[in-house]
Amino acid sequence: MGSNVTVKGHRRVFEIILVLALCPTCTNGRGAVSDTLSDSLSSVGGTLPHFLQEPEDAYIIKNNPIKLRCRATPALQIFFKCNGEWVHQNQHTSQEYMDQNTGLKIREVTINVTRQQVEDFHGPEDYWCLCVAWSHLGTSKSRKATVRIAYLRKNFEQDPQGKEVPIKGMIVLHCRPPEGVPMAEVEWLKNEELVTSLGDDNIDTRADHNLIINEARLSDSANYTCLASNIVAKRRSATATVVVFVNGGWSLWTEWSSCSVNCGRGVQKRSRTCTNPAPLNGGAFCEGMSVQKITCNALCPVDGVWEEWSEWTMCSVQCERQRWRECNAPPPRHRGKMCEGEGQGMENCTGGLCTQSMENSIDVALYSGLAAGVIAVVVLIVAITLYRKSQSEYGVDVIDSSALAGGFQSFNFKTTRQGNPLLLNSSMQPDITVGQTYSGPICFQDSIDKELFDPLPDKVKVQSSFMVSLGVADRAEYHVKTHLETLPANLHPNYSTVDGKKTTLIAPNGLHTPGKTRLKTSAVFGHLGGRLVIPNAGVSLLVPHGAIADDTSWEMYMLINQGESSAQSEERCEILLGPEITYGPLGLNLSYPVAMTIAHCAEVSAENWNIKLKRQTKDNKWEEIMSVDDESTSCYCLMDSHNCHLLLDQPGCYALVGEPVTDAAIKRLRIAVFGSMETSSMDYNLRVHCVDDTPHAFQGVVTAETSRGGQLLEEPKTLFFKGNCLSLQVSIQDIPQFLWSIKPFTTCQEFSFTQVWYSNQQPVHCAFSLQRHSASTTQLSCKISVRQVKGHEQLLQVYSSVGESEKETVPFFMQADCTVTSETGAKAFKIPLSIRQRICTTFDTANAKGKDWQLLAQKLHIQRNLSYFTKQKSPSAVILSLWEARHQDSGDLDSLASALEEIGKIHCKSLPQSPDEKETDFTF
């Protein structure tokens, strides 16, 4: 028993001596030993030291030292041992603190390891360190932590190799990264963009650093780079060029042609083309013959020949006998001629014994002829009587077209075409002014008023001898203020004046301001009406005469909403066919509907399109108010080839929406190519735009190109894009390779069907970056092909002069007099007010043959939804407003004059003319 106590005492003394030996600082001051002993005695517990934190593996980057850290409890001391040797106390940093939860003292020690220490160590294993912690019960060791110098070699062990792969073939690109510590991670770049397999089951980047594409697509043609990286650096491999090619395939054979001869031995042909698919990116051309020939034997024609006559029949009671023959000896075959002559013969068989019967037949014929003559005379007399009676119902109120044409001269809103400075090659003279490219309203001309409203003659002599007195109503003009972006605050006067008469002006309750960018125009209109036009947008609004009550004026506005539209439904493949148009103000009270014209981009066909008119409700939702092909009394829609004309009673926001019924539904696209020099004088950029074939959409392209100095290189063209879910391809061809170069795999660019079909939301455009080999190269010639797969194609031929002088911006060609966006009063209309009133008075009056305005509508080619006009106060006035909207860009009155001329001929075709009257020749 005494010996055990002695052993325990010796062990305790040994621990105290060890502490003093390892901690020389413990005896530096007076009472230090007793302090240490007291601390040691106070930390006596019942367990070995437990590590709360052990040293972790670390990498030395460049010359930066790393720290190794240990933390344990309970512990009298903690020391590091590296590579089997104790680390000196001076290299330790130690601290001790109390754990608030357990009440135990925790000791933490750290050391620094430098790059030099690791490099100087030469052993069978990596540089390593561990911690040793002491307590009164003994020691505990931590895990070994290795310290290595991080690096990454420059050269890849295996670079990826470029290859050519057929479409739908497998692409495997191998990559072995450079040696490094730690081991490098590998990523792949495609045309400098990161490749990821997330969301694309066709791509696998996880197989031993390799890139695997299971089925190659055309879009997989690109430059691929292997990117290796660790904590030290990043390394790039050599670029591997992958080309996905398409071998050509034969189309189906055509039907055999007809035999080359009509008689005898000839040849038949059939053909096929290498377009299913066409070879692409160096793919092989189709093997075999494109034309097949076979011999044919055409049967020669055989003309028919008469058989012998049959025997005569017995003599009939009519004293006749007959005989027959047939064309059967032989019959005509193989396109042969029929027999010439009669197949039946007849003769008298009495020898003159039937003379009395024949005389009776002659008498019957004579009496029948006399009776027919009497009936004809009676019918003629009745017809003349009815004609004179119907003629008296019209009198001089039927306006002849000669009177209309003699009353005023024709005019045109469009200006004379001028040179286009936006086009580089002046010899080609493409015209991108919206007024000439599209049949929509552009602007007004000041010269129209004088030309149109010269006084009419008091009386006009016409071919139908009507004497019609026509006069022109006095004109009154309002002072109009127009704008395109914001309305000035002083546009709301309390009163306005018409012919010196004081009238009340009703101000709108604030402009409608939807949360979209918009183009605006506005003016103040009164009883005489007028017209609003947004320049270069294909949009106009006609306010007819009498629509606004007398002694009242309204400030009216019209604007185009821009941005994403909720009017179309992608679930039903609906698209906007033109811009969204808002007119107001709200609360506007009109006696006659306004006529709104919107340019659209559809090839109109009832079999292929279901075209609807939608209106935005107060809660910003869209409701369908009519289908173009249905009957409606709330509004009227007339579709022309490029414009839609609407008759509307209520202000609001309207949109024309099209839903394709079949795959043959066609949307027109406007194709244009622009070019400009880039920052480097050796680079030239070609930009191809595919937008809806409307003036508003194309004007947006021109504005954007003008801002960046773009120049139009070729006359814009129209592409017919079908709603058959096939994509659009844009390619550049015939580049002179000895003068110019282009980035690989950018010569053909493809856009999905959805991108093109909904291009009104995000216009489709692409760019081709060219670089000339020498600064002396000043000419560029190439072709731009824009085609829908298995559909329509357009070629744009580019001939451009490239030089330093071309860098300056050329402004877009604008019409010099496109500054007036509204006109009020009589000068806004083509038909003078006096003639308009006479037409309405004449055709709104009922007669025995029904409403004459229906005949006017028929002659003006307005033949559907006539129930809408029936409910109007003056059907003729509304019809003439619709005519004004349809012909605002034609500049003449031919169609109206021709219609009135036809009506005049119907009702006075046989009217006698006085001998001393001479016909007056009018040119309509």
Image (cartoon, rainbow, N blue to C red):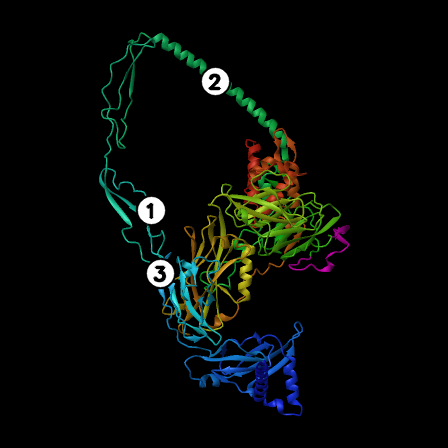
Farthest residue, direction left: 265
**Is residue 193 depicted above or below 270 in this figure?**
below
Residue tagged by mark 2? 372
Nearer to us of marks 2 and 1 is 1
Q: Residue 350, which numbered label?
A: none
The crowding category of the residue bearing disc 2, from other C-alpha atoms within 10 Å (few below 14, some 14 to 19, many at least 20), is: few
Name the N-terminal-most of marks 2 and 1.
1
**Residue 713 at x, y percent in the picture:** 46, 63
Which element carries disc 3, helix, strand or loop?
Answer: strand
Q: CA distance from mark 3 to mark 1?
A: 26 Å
Q: CA distance from mark 2 to mark 1?
A: 67 Å
Instruction: Give the amino acid type for the residue marked by disc 2 in the picture.
Output: Ala
**Residue 436 at x, y percent in the picture:** 53, 55
Numbered range of the magenta stretch: 481-507
Nearer to us of marks 3 and 1 is 3
- Name the image quarter holding residue 741: bottom left
**Residue 183 at x, y percent in the picture:** 44, 73
Q: Residue 165, which numbered label?
A: 3
Q: CA distance from mark 3 to mark 2?
A: 90 Å
Residue tagged by mark 1? 252
Residue 397 in view in this figure: yes
